Image (cartoon, helix red, strand yellow):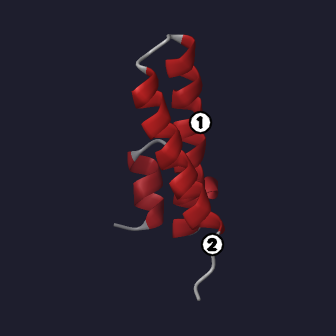
Amino acid sequence: MTLEQVAIKYNINTNSLNAKDDALKVSVKSIQFLVKELERKKVDPNLVTQLKKLGSFLHDVSESTVG
């Protein structure tokens, strides 16, 4: 599957998904949105913490270099 096909499948602007690294950035933004909604709805704090941790991991991976 090409990145364009992935973008279409998940209803993401194809211009926002030019490289695999972009997918990480889209994921981080989605997780940040979900965290805000879960906090607003006062969902289990442990779930929110784990989601934040996942978002931080993806962000760190997207900003990292090899070596």
Residue annotated with mark 2: 64
Residue 23 pos. (x, y %):
52, 58
Which part of the image, by quadrant, shows the C terminus? bottom right
Seen at 42% across and 44% down, the residue is: 10
Residue 58 pos. (x, y %):
52, 56
Seen at 50% across and 45% down, the residue is: 53
Front residue of 51 and 28 = 51
CA distance for labels 1 and 2: 19 Å
- Work out whether mark 1 precedes mark 2 in sequence or the reverse, and give the earlier one: 1
Residue annotated with mark 1: 32
Residue extending furthest front?
A: 46
Q: How crowded is the residue under tag 2: few (<14 C-alpha within 10 Å), some, or many (20+)?
A: few
Front residue of 62 and 8 = 62
Which part of the image, by quadrant, shows the N terminus? bottom left
Residue 13 in view, yes or no: no
Residue 58 in view, yes or no: yes
- When the figure is inspected, residue 15 is found, relative to residue 29, above or below; the finding is below
Residue extending furthest bottom?
A: 67
Identify residue type, mark 1: Gln
Cβ–Cβ under 8 Å for marks 1 and 2: no
Identify residue type, mark 2: Ser
Residue 52 pos. (x, y %):
53, 39
Q: How crowded is the residue under tag 1: few (<14 C-alpha within 10 Å), some, or many (20+)?
A: some
- When the figure is inspected, residue 49 is found, relative to residue 1, above or below; the finding is above
Secondary structure of the residue carrying tag 2 is: loop
Front residue of 28 and 12 = 28
Residue 36 pos. (x, y %):
59, 24
Seen at 51% across and 29% down, the residue is: 34
Q: Which mark is residue 51?
A: none
Secondary structure of the residue carrying tag 1 is: helix
